[in-house]
Amino acid sequence: MITPDRIDELMARSVLRDQRAFAELYRVTSSRLLGVAMRIVRRRDWAEDILQESFVSIWHHVGDFDRSRASPMTWMTTIVRNRALDWVRRPKMEVPDDDLDGIVERWEDDRPGPQQLLETRGSGAALQDCLGQLSGQQRQTIALAYLHGLTHSELAEHMKQPLGTVKTWVRRGLEKLRGCMDAAEAA
């Protein structure tokens, strides 16, 4: 069993950006924190996404942790709990896999997609630069979806990731890509 002192030590080392300590912190606390998320959202794929986002937040804000206000486990649980509650309150975007046409209709807009932008630009340098700013997962999911025509379900199966995670990567990647392309067009 992990002791509170061990968690304190791992948090202190994580403040110093010790990735091994943070990985160990994840290993010893993630199952309990996943349980917190599961009790709120009641779906494992969503809870896994919440846990992932929470640990990214923990990594970025571990230096802000104040031991005088809460124990490390309480602080991390609060982060997960708040993310899960935000997740429940958000507009429902998940639909059954058999309604893929509905997904496309909801996400369609009049702006050109990445493929069209590449074709309309002489060199495609702006798109290439913007794609380079995406994370590896975002770049891969967008390429597989738009250049190879894989559905979200096929992407999840191909990448061996939960459907919700893959949808998040695609959505966030497209948002970042559109923002970057809009900025490139304005320049």
Image: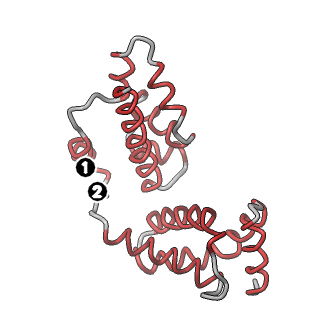
Q: Image point 23% across, 39% down: which residue?
A: 108
- Do the numbered discs 1 and 2 sit on residues whose CB atoms are within 8 Å? yes
Identity of the residue drawn at 38% across and 31% down: 181
Extreme residue in the top direction: 122
Seen at 44% across and 18% down, the residue is: 124
Judge by depth and name the residue closer to the eye, 165 or 78.
Answer: 78
| SS type, badge 2 | loop
Q: Is 165 on the left-hand or right-hand side of 187?
A: right
Report the amino acid beneath label 2.
Val
Q: Answer with left or right where residue 143 lies relative to residue 151.
A: right
User: Mark 1 and mark 2: span between their CA atoms?
Assistant: 7 Å
Residue ID for mark 2: 95
In the rendered structure, which amino acid carries the disc numbered 1?
A: Asp
Please tell me in which quadrant of the rendered image residue 121 appears: top left
* Place of residue 83 in the rendered image (x, y in percent of width and height, measured from the top left): 45, 71
When the figure is inspected, residue 164 is found, relative to residue 180, above or below; the finding is: below
Is label 1 in a helix, a strand or a loop?
Answer: helix
